[in-house]
Image (spheres, helix red, strand yellow):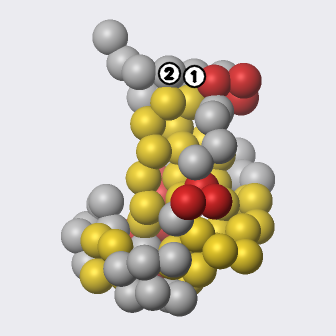
Amino acid sequence: MLDKMTRYIWCHACYHTLIRKKGLTIHQVVVIFHGLALDDYLCDHCADHIAVSDACYAISFVDKESDHQEWENGYLAELERIDIEI
């Protein structure tokens, strides 16, 4: 059984891979925030280094919008939500 929400920090390149992919089947809803890294991270998709203050994305896959629980503020500054249809 899948959790109601899975969350990731992705680099800029991997975010654009997600946008091109279209048609994800694991979850119906993707919640994305763009911001600046508050710490050093590794991209959860490709494992590339994301340095402090680098632009990156907090991505949550949820079954429905109400399953999303905010977590992004602990990882990114200057958050901007991105609404896309996948």
Q: Which residue is mark 2?
A: 4
Q: Which residue is mark 1?
A: 63
Residue extending furthest top?
Answer: 1
Q: On screen, 85 above or below 44?
A: above
Evaluate whether residue 28 shows in this view. Answer: no
Is residue 13 shown left or right of residue 66? left
In this orientation, which residue lies closer to the viewer: 33 or 40?
A: 40
Q: Amino acid at mark 1?
A: Asp
Residue 70, given in percent of the width and then of the height, sits at 65, 43
Dot 2, how many residues are within 10 Å of its Cα: few (below 14), some (14-19), or many (20+)? Answer: some
Q: Secondary structure at mark 1?
A: loop
Residue extending furthest left?
Answer: 47
Residue 63, given in percent of the width and then of the height, sits at 57, 22
Image-quadrant location for residue 62 = top right
- The residue shown at (52%, 38%) is 61
Is residue 86 shown left or right of residue 66? left
- The residue shown at (50%, 30%) is 5
The numbered mark, 2 or 1, whose residue comes first in the sequence reads 2
Mark 2 and mark 1: Cα distance apart in space? 6 Å
Q: Which mark is residue 40?
A: none
Dot 1, how many residues are within 10 Å of its Cα: few (below 14), some (14-19), or many (20+)? Answer: some
Quadrant for the N terminus, please.
top left
Q: On screen, 18 above or below 61?
A: below
In this orientation, which residue lies closer to the viewer: 38 or 32?
A: 38
Q: Amino acid at mark 2?
A: Lys
Q: On screen, 82 above or below 1?
A: below
